[in-house]
Amino acid sequence: MIVLLGDSHSRAIINGYAKLSQAERRTVSEAVDFRCGFLGPAFSFSEPFWMRRSDGISFAKEDMQKRFEGVVGSQAGIIRPGDHRKFIFSIGSQPSLLHVPNLWAEFTAGSGQEDTHYLSRSAFRETLKYYNRFSFGFFRTLKELNVDFSVLASPPPSPHFALVEQLGRRALDLWRLHDEIFYEELNSMAIDYEVPPEIVRQSTTRYLRLPLHDSLFLSSPHGNADYGELFLRDLLTKKGVSGIAFDADEVDRTLDSPATLAAWYIKLGFSLANQRSSAAPLQFDQALKIEPQNPKAMFGLGYAYGQLHLTHEAEAQLTRTLSKYSDYAECWAALAVVRIGKGMYKEAQSAMENAVAMDPSRVDRQLRLASILERTGELARAGEILTEILFGEMGQKALHLGVHSSEEKIGLDPVVFETDPYAAATLLTRDPAPFWIILGRIELRSGRRSAAEQCFQRACSLSTAKPVWFAYLADICFERGDFHRAIEGYEAALKASPKVLKYYKRLGISYERIGRIESARSIYLRGLSELPLESELAALLESAISNEKRAASTA
Amino acid sequence: MNPYEALPDRNYWSRSVAKISPFDVSELYNKKFEISPTDKISTAGSCFAQHIAKRLAKAGFDYCDFEPPLAAFPRERMADYNYGVYSARYCNIYTVRQLLQTFKRAFGIFEPLDQFWQDVDGVRDPFRPALEPVPFVDRHEAQASREAHFKSVRSLFSTSDLFIFTLGLTEAWIDVRDGAVLPLCPGTKGGVFDPDRHRFANFNTSQMRQDLEEFVELCSNLNPKLKFLLTVSPVPLVATATDNHVITATTYSKSALRAVAGEFADAHPRVAYFPSYEIIAAPPFRGTFFESNMRGVSEHGVDFVMSNFFKSHPPNIAQQLVTPILVDQQKSAVDVVCEEMLLEMYAR
């Protein structure tokens, strides 16, 4: 029996096994009784996870022991001295040490970096040994018990791991160092290490074969069936199972099915750009080196610049893209957003109108167009669009699409792009507030104060209400003399924006108007503590004090 | 009427020493300035300075570590890797010249010719040869470690409010080609001794005074608010390279160090002297605070030294509860990182 168990990397093997054909699985089971299963996440092995018993070893954590028994049978849940089973443990090799939050923010090792503290190889080894002391203790005890086992090597790092996105190049150095030192420690204990097949590390044309030192790995082998299948075929072949080896020349496995190298770079680029990573433009550059006219790469580069607020570069690149691909709706929309960021609303309007004309079903773009129109003064058109979204066919369609699983929110942030057509439903069903605010502003500018107040009221009643919206509502209430409601609104707005003069002034005046002079005085003082040079506040304070004295003397 | 009549008891041996228990001797320290709870304190020096570092941290002062270990690094190994021993991982700084050189190297003012020692088992930093239990893998690693260290040292001198330096030795080994002073004789912990290149030096008071002047001036130009507290290590020499008996050599060293520390402190308003040397080694204390080898300072000795310090600079009680100890409480006061002890190996 061969039993493969361990951390989440064992999932790749489990998924890989599922990819074998029925005939191949039969071959495997006739040759060896192969079992594989998941014991626990990588970090669970950096805590006490096993215990020595008089008759062998079992797992100290109940869930782990249950999973073990689930794989080998409940009667066989103890690893005994000289156990007849051959074990392959995916334990300790995944560098969960590197994933401890914030641990490596100020440190590096290996190649080193200027702005960080430096950990020597020796010190790194001490850290690794200490962090993995329970795993190494487990291995040592297995050796003492004469159990036949080996350790599964970790897959290469994925750019989607937080560590890689956080630390970039440095993450690869740390990862490589961890691998080397972990392997050295196993070697010193004469423990075999099952490494991924050469195909994963050697070739230069396929994703699995990109050398670690060359670039961030484009896709994630972690838990991945294709990767696991290759590894499993190679592993079982080495263990003597014939008939399931893979043909290296025929292998063309990719994780997320981009067919070309350029596509991989583009995919990574968008992933990084959405994280506002400064590494994003480089990926699109790489893609453009391979396919200079690739529209998605051209657009992606502009998008990446936009995400980094490099508006000049973004405008130039997006314009260049549109000169070649004038029917690229997404690019027009992105250009519009960049122009909003530059305050060029008229130019943004024409770009977004193009985008909307090419794909009217995109509610998010309709909303953005309405927002632009409100800025450029075309209130009627803006209002029509919003009304249609909220109450018309488009809105109903969007509502009936249902709640999407994505947690992405569309706000009025000018540099958020949505690529998911169902996200409009998210906007409407999760957070309709922005619609109400824009509509409210439109109504206000059109002189319909009562309608505007209702819109702002609706927006403010939502859990996602922003403090500034309370100020919109407060302004209307203040101007019509409802000082109690104005007070509520300005107090809420001041909590988030304590340096806005208008809020202090109007709040103080509102208190004065309802006869609470002392509260007014306190507000003016609060304002002066935040804005000490505001003479208007000082004047209001003086006036409030005089009024208070006058009221007192009259009484 | 003469000046002696108005002097307090502490100025008189008979009243403040002869007739009282040594443990009641007090007012040894002339406080020159206050140390506020928010003053950032850094330390450096010879082995004895490590005691001061640990006790300050424990007492709740804002003791700073500019080169901390990785949070996941095993605590029991920290001292072996010189983490938490001083405010940066410069290892022991025995002489004033070495202190000045450390500053100059960190700020790029001086670059020694001898950058690395390539030994059989790896690469060592000649100026921190005992930094870690094993040498660096290669020059790249040694260089990366050094650059990170210098960055910490620059930060230390730029931002500290108080720098406490314990003067330890007058003897050192110098590279004659450029005057670089080495903390350990080459060949004792890495490197190769070359009689044509390596010369013994026993600094005198005038040399040390000059070095101190230069050091304080450089620091003050960089960080005008920085104050200094000097103290002299009472720990005798492990070995002397002079022709003298080690007792004679020790007496010279400590006397010269004491003289220069005192003179310098008297001459500079921002420099104070703390008498840890006297507290341990002065005759009235009868060697009580030395370990059986008459060299290491006992835990009680360190306690007594620090109790005198804390009388003038009370600990921050509230902060004691939250300040983590930089290095786990080591088992005894003698259990410090002392590269000088390596010289003992060469005793036949």
Image (cartoon, grey):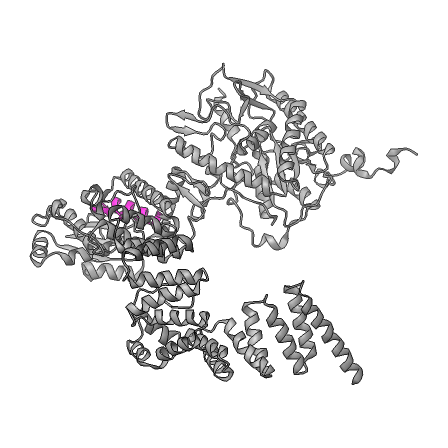
Query: Which quadrant holds the C terminus of chain A?
Result: bottom right
Residue farthest to the top, as pictured: B196
Q: Position of residue A329 (x, y in %)?
A: 30, 64
Q: Is residue A45 above or below residue A521?
A: above
Quadrant of the image occupied by residue B8: top right
User: Looking at the image, which is closer to me, B16 or A172?
Assistant: A172
Residue occupying the point 64% across, 64% down? A531
- Judged left or right of residue B322, residue A387 is left
Task: For residue B86, say whether it is visible.
Answer: no
Residue occupying the point 42% across, 78% down? A380
Q: Is residue A243 magenta?
A: no
Range covered by the magenta-colored residues:
A132-155
User: Looking at the image, which is closer to me, A221 or A137?
Assistant: A221
Q: Position of residue A400 (x, y in %)?
A: 29, 79
Q: Is residue B337 above or below residue A319?
A: above
- Judged left or right of residue B294, residue A456 is left
- Judged left or right of residue B161, residue B29 is right
Q: Is residue A513 above or below residue B295?
A: below
